[in-house]
Image (cartoon, rainbow, N blue to C red):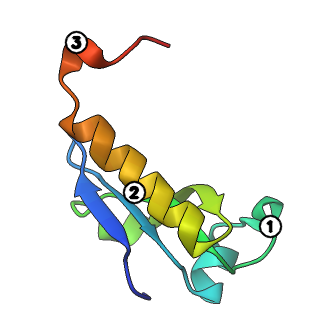
Amino acid sequence: MQHVLFSTRLTDGREICVSPISADTFEANKAHSLGDDTGYFIYEFDARRPSVGIEILAKAISFDAAVRLVDIFVGAALAPPESMGSI
């Protein structure tokens, strides 16, 4: 796997990551609707079940976009619960 830009463990034990992925991983996830294997991918990984692999959730098309996503994740994690709005 290439350099991971961001990784954090979620409350359910899975990890969410932002990083480039290999062409093989892109193909294995059948992620063609996201274009090609370039860019930074947002994906989940369950370390308790590594044989399952990763699940790609989204794609950031540039390094700057990936860094912005990491900023958003970190900001949300540090925000007090009462400051979070509901969806």
Q: Name the residue at 56% across, 74% down.
A: 63
Give the image location of residue 44, x and y in percent: 41, 56
Tell me where residue 28 sits by quadrant.
bottom right
Quick one: 50 or 78, which is closer to the camera? 78
Label 2 Cα neighbours within 10 Å, binned few <14 / some 14-19 / many ≥20: some
| Amino acid type at image mark 3 | Glu
Q: Is residue 39 left or right of residue 85?
A: right
Residue 78 lies left or right of residue 17; in this view the side is left
Image quarter in which the N terminus is found: bottom left
The local secondary structure at tag 3 comes to helix
Label 2, label 3: how many angstroms apart (C-alpha)? 21 Å
Dot 3: few (<14), some (14–19), or many (≥20) neighbours within 10 Å? few
Q: Which residue matches tag 3? A: 82
Residue 57 sits above or below residue 24 on the image: above
Identify the secondary structure beneath mark 2.
Answer: helix
Q: CA distance from mark 1 to mark 2?
A: 24 Å
Residue, x 25% and y 56% (percent of image)?
8
Nearer mark to the viewer, of 1 and 3: 3
Q: Are marks 1 and 3 in contact (CB under 8 Å)?
A: no
Q: Which residue is mark 2?
A: 70
Q: Is residue 78 left or right of residue 50?
A: left
Residue 29 sits in quarter: bottom right
Question: Which is more foreground, mark 1 or mark 2?
Answer: 2
Mark seen at residue 32: 1
Q: Residue at x 36, y 46 (%)?
A: 73
Upstream in the sequence, badge 1 or badge 3? 1
